[in-house]
Amino acid sequence: MMRRHLFLLPLMGVLLSTCSKEGKLLSVHSPDDSIQIVFSDTAGVLEYQLLWHGEKIVRPSVLSITPNARVKIVKTKGVSKDTTWHPTWGQQSSIRDHYNELQLEMDWDGVGGKLLARAYDEGVAFRFVLHAGEKPTDVIFRCEYDLPKGSNYYTPAGENEPLGPVNFSELTDFLQENSRRKRRISVPLVVESPDQSFMALLESDLYAASGIKPMRLDTSGVDGKFQAINEVGLSEKEWTSPWRVILLGKMAGDLVVNTVPINLATPCQLEDTQWIKPGKTLWDWRVHGYTAADGFVYGINTESYKRFIDFAAENGIEYFLIDDAWYTHVSPGHFELSDKLDLEAVIDYAAEKEVELLLYYDRRHGEYGDDELFPYYQSLGMKGIKYGFMGSKVDFSRQAIQKSAQSQLLIDFHDGPVPFTGIRRTYPNAITREYCHAQQDSRRAFTPESFIKMALINAITGPLDMNNGNFDLTGINSGLRQKGPRKTNSYFSTVTAEAARTLIIFSGLVCIPDAPEAYSAKADLFEFIQKMPVGKWDESRILHSKMDEYITTARRHGKEWFIGSAYSQQGGTLDIKLDFLEEGVEYKVTYYEDTEATHCKTNPEAYRIRQGRLKNGDVIKTVMAPGGGHCMWIRPSKHY
């Protein structure tokens, strides 16, 4: 049930206003009073500053929508809202949307509009709305951030390990060195302040902003000063910008489960969401060349795909994803099917076994036409599409999401997609995307440090398709796979860490990329992945997090808890305090652990499993090998 409390608070401290000769000073506070945004329009320039627990964390910075236009605040309004809503799927089953908002009616040299400024307990956001009517042609949505000097910075780097920690000078040098390749700061920019608190700069609700390019961040050359820019093409219709978002957290992991970005997203646009089913999927692409114990060699053929489907059916895996090469040529309205496999036979076999299919499409191979593409996939009985190489086109990507929904298809974006933070609320069929270095992307190595950084940086933008969960690590590293790492023995992980990673990285579609036989050989460890629900979490917490070193994630489904930890190549221990378990209940726990002999480089497949009992308040000392991990499956045993 949704709770609604919507009311104006002009006299209750939500909106404070003072006047000076230079202009107006206006402020809005978060509901818990920990955050304050202060605005001024001195000399016709709109500036804001941000305070957190009384400390200034963003010094006076400019907000603008048209270059060099003089700003005039016409009137103000304060609004407070407190509602609860329930996502179709997600990290939480119930989300509270609680904020105070300052609405500034404004004039930019005759162009009318307003600025919306929202203060949550966990962050703030800004949005411009330009009223209908004549507008300038050179509209640029610009937001400056004057951040604490001496901070460390982290940013995604496409199919590479995220950049960071770097100081401001190092970040500036990186941008200058890569200027010819047009490398810019990707969102989110994660900022570790000198006091070791964290913030993240990003945007949400691109869905609502038409005719816009994705946000790009750049430095001004002055320590701590950044600017985020969106270039916009406008008509005379009303136009709404994306939300410019600043998230705040005491530790890096707080940003990953922060609900501000999804609260800012446009509510669900689908009347029927019953067909949207998050889940796990097997995937063929990284298995090609694997030789099973009976001598069978996996490839692009009917028998290989039937083996995947058999394993999925036997182990409750909802989906099987068929990647590239099921077709040979694409022309408008037509696919030339490959003679390597009998796709119709595979489709019929999957239907017989009650396993749903997902099918890849690479736009570089030719233009089929999206108006025909999605209905064609639906006619084949597909439940989803993995859409390859969309590029950074916001409007094109939005249309692909909408059109796939019209054909009741899940959509998973391949390499380098627009982040589209919050879109899973608006169109929950946008089930995941590879906004990260998916395991073995471009056949490069994948380190524990890469994983931990992406889990604490890229994942802030939403669900990731990272392809965790390899179990045949020795075989992969030996070069026996056709699409394994180009350099042998360069993929560092342990099988326990691989299991943990499938939980740590939130996604509506958890893609497990190894061969069925690799999972069958370690069925007792695979149990953690098999039992773990996907997407339908009631509660998610980051218990431990430190950039480059470790992360622990706990997720609850009903009365069961799944906990996964991963550590860097130095290995280490983490104490997990179970103060979130229900009091008066005894719990059974299965531990999935590294052993004393486990090592991500020399002995990655050594693991052990043991059983135990737990109760509220117990503290578990988890021991992880270099590059290792730890998992727990906790479920009620009895009340006492």
Image (cartoon, rainbow, N blue to C red):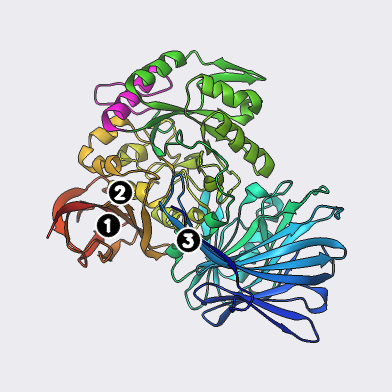
Residue 625: numbered disc:
1
Residue 483 in the image: x percent, y percent? Answer: 44, 33
For disc 3, the marked residue is 258
- Work out whether mark 2 precedes mark 3 in sequence or the reverse, and give the earlier one: 3
Q: Are marks 2 and 1 in contact (CB under 8 Å)?
A: yes
What span is in magenta?
A: 289-316
Vertical placement of 274 versus 308: above or below?
A: below
Vertical placement of 315 versus 416: above or below?
A: above
- Work out whether mark 3 precedes mark 1 in sequence or the reverse, and give the earlier one: 3
Q: Is residue 307 magenta?
A: yes
Left or right: where 284 falls relative to 151: left
At a point 77% along the width and 76% down the height, the residue shown is: 41
Amino acid carrying label 1: it is: Ala
Q: Nearer the viewer, residue 288 or 242?
A: 242
For the residues labelled 3 and 1, the Cα–Cα distance comes to 30 Å
For disc 2, the marked residue is 494
Q: Is residue 566 magenta?
A: no
Q: Of the residues tagged 2 and 3, which is closer to the observer?
A: 3
| The image quarter in which residue 286 lies | top left
Question: SS for tag 3?
Answer: loop
Q: Nearer the viewer, residue 564 or 625?
A: 564
Amino acid carrying label 2: it is: Thr
Q: Nearer the viewer, residue 636 or 317?
A: 636
Question: SS for tag 2?
Answer: loop
Residue 383 in the image: x percent, y percent? Answer: 47, 28
Q: Residues within 10 Å of mark 2 (few under 14, many from 20)?
A: many
Left or right: where 450 falls relative to 11: left
Vertical placement of 344 versus 464: above or below?
A: above
